[in-house]
Amino acid sequence: WMLKITAYADRLIDDLEDVDWPESIKDMQRNWIGRSTGAEISFQVEGLDATLSVFTTRPDTLFGATYMSVAPEHPALSQLTTADQKAEVEAYVESAGRKSDLERTELQKDKSGVWTGSYAINPVNGEKIPVWVADYVLGGYGSGAVMAVPAHDTRDHEFATKYGLPI
């Protein structure tokens, strides 16, 4: 049952109103269940008839997005990868494939990635932002792509600093 908790998140949260518990305990339960409210945002990929979609709970941070990252197993990665970057991206994907999801998302691990050679267009300001493949993004979580806002996210900041990306 605990492995299927996401399938029951809405019902669990809604049914908390029927439980005679202190509000602080109900808040802890809501946070533990973890239902997110937000928006799905699509970024056009420059030069391709393709978009990358991300889910964000903070659409107000779109102006601060300076790059995107996709999971090594993202279905559009081969389409996103330019000929100049193909060998480097393929080697990176093979290396990332030897890691478990737990190893890839470890907060203390060194963030790693490779530029795909592609750019996405930030939908709020029209700026080109580079698209990277990074092992901290998981294909089975959300859309398998993230918009990176290094001024507001520690993980994004560490990655941007390491690779000289704008903050």
Image (cartoon, helix red, strand yellow):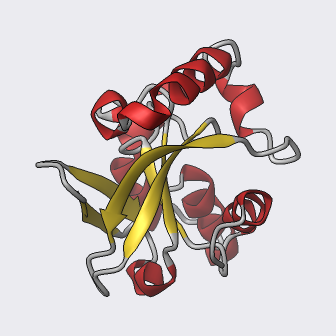
103 is higher (above) or lower (below) than 38? above
Q: Write the residue at 40% across / 44% down.
A: 142
166 is higher (above) or lower (below) than 75? below
Q: Residue furthest front?
A: 84
Q: Is 25 left, or right, of 106 in this rendering?
A: left
Q: Is residue 1 visible in this depiction of the protein?
A: no
Query: Quadrant of residue 36 in the image?
Result: bottom left
Q: Nearer the viewer, residue 68 or 130?
A: 130
Q: Residue furthest left?
A: 49
Q: Nearer the viewer, residue 124 or 56?
A: 124
**Image coordinates for residue 3, horizontal then vertical, percent:** 53, 25
**Image coordinates for residue 20, horizontal then vertical, percent:** 55, 65
Q: Write the residue at 79% across / 39% down.
A: 106
Q: Is 17 left, or right, of 89 in this rendering?
A: left
**Image coordinates for residue 153, horizontal then vertical, percent:** 67, 71
Q: Write the residue at 33% across / 40% down.
A: 80
Q: Is 41 left, or right, of 94 in this rendering?
A: left
